Amino acid sequence: MSDDLPPNPALLPAGLRDLLPPDAETEALSVEQLMAVFASHGYERVKPPLLEFEDSLLSGSGAAVAEQTFRLMDPSTRRMMGLRPDMTPQVARIAATRLINASRPLRLSYAGACIQVQGGTLVADRQISQAGIELIGPDQPEADAEVIAVASQALASLGLTRVSFDLTLPQLAPMLIEEAGIPAAHRPELMRALDRKNAAEVSHHGGALAPLLNELLLAAGPAARALQVLQAASLTPAARLLVDRLEASVAAILARAPGLRLTIDPIEFRGWRYHTGLCVTVYAPGRHEELGRGGRYLSGGDEPACGLTLRPEALLRAAPGRAARPRVLLPPDVDATLAQSLRQAGYATVASLSPHAELAAEAVRLGCSHVLRGGEAVAVVPSSSGD
C-alpha cells in the first residue's frame, strides 16, 4: 500500500499560476486600456485561436518558435496541433491568407494568452499574456517609428512614462563574422562571448575581427553616442546598410516622439529568430525584466512587417499601483435604481444576503470599503482588535 499523499489541488505545473483578485481585474483592465490606444491609431483587432495545426502554426516565421511550442494530437483529425508560444506568427498568417487582399499598410492588434515550453531566464512564467500591434506592408523608417511611438503612448496610458526602448541589429554580428571568414567551428564560442558581453573572450575567439567587435560592444548605450561610434567604425558595405537604416529609424522615432528614451546595443542578437531587421526591447527604470519586444520580420515569407508585443504580466509588476475599485455593501431591500447609480459612479455593489446581519461588520467581513446608509455610500472604519 502506498503512503503517498494525494496531490494538493492548488498545485500547478511549473511556470503556470492562478491570477487572483485584484490582480486579475487589474491586468484585464490594463490590456483593454492598451487595446484602446492601439485602436485609436487605426490598429484593428484580430483574435487567432489558441491552438492551430502544427504545419500552419510553425510555417514561415512560426518555424522560429518551434522549440517553444507544446504539441498534442487532435483526436478528431489525428493531426498534430500546437499551442501558440507567440502571437506574431499567427497574425502574419492571417495577413497572408484571410487578409491577403486588404489594403496596405495593414494595421492589426491582438491580445491573448500564450504557452511556452520554458520560461525566460529572469521570469519563469510559461503561461504569458501578450498585447501588441503589427504594421504589415511598408518597409521604411517611418513604419518603425510608428510602432514604437504607438507602443510608447500605450505604456504611458498605464503610467509607464519613463520606459526605454533598446534598439538592436540581430543580423549585424553574424554578418560581420560570416564576412570575416571566421571558421564555423569557432563561431559558437565567439557568439557566446558576444552574448555575455565578455570582451576578453571576444578577443580570444574573434581573431582579426575582435577589435571591431569589442568597439561595437562598447558602443552600447544612449542612441546618439552609439550612432557616432557606429558611423565611425570600419564596416563592410552590407553592415553599413544596416547601420544607415538604424540611423534613419532613430531619426524618424525622435521626430515622432522627441522625448523618447532610446538606447542602442548593436551586437545584441537574442530574441525570436524570425526577426530580419531592426529590433526593439522595452525596459522600465530599475528593472531587468523586459516589458515587451518586437522588430522587423517577413509576413507570409516575403511581405515586410514590423510589430511590438507587450507583456501584461510584466507591465502589472512595473506600472504604478492602480487603486482598487471601492466596494459598497447593499442591504437586501435596496432600490435597484439607486444600486445602478452607485455602479455608474464607479462602485462595485455587493448585495447582502444576510437580512439580520449588522451592515458595518458584514461589510468588513466581505471586504467592502463602504456601506449604503441614507441613500449614500458611507466609508466603513474597521474596529480595532482592542474594541
Image: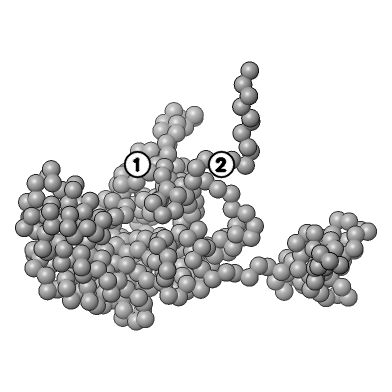
Residue at image location 39% in from the left, 66% down from the top: 283
Horizontal and vertical percent position of residue 171: 20, 57
The answer to whether residue 320 is visible is yes
Q: Which residue is mark 2?
A: 12
| Along the line of sight, the residue nearer the viewer: 210 or 149 | 210
Give the crowd class for mark 1: few <14, some 14-19, many >=20 residues within 10 Å.
Answer: few
Q: Secondary structure at mark 1?
A: helix
| Along the line of sight, the residue nearer the viewer: 324 or 194 | 194
In contact (CB < 8 Å): disc 2 and disc 1: no
The answer to whether residue 32 is visible is no
Residue at image location 51% in from the left, 63% down from the top: 317
Residue at image location 64% in from the left, 60% down from the top: 22
Q: Is residue 293 above or below residue 86?
A: below
| Along the line of sight, the residue nearer the viewer: 166 or 220 | 220
Q: Which mark is residue 67?
A: 1
Task: Report the side of 258 relative to 45 (left or right).
Answer: left
- View extreme (right): residue: 356
Task: Give the amino acid at mark 2.
Answer: Leu
Q: Which quarter of the rendering shows the C terminus?
A: bottom right
Horizontal and vertical percent position of residue 313: 50, 58
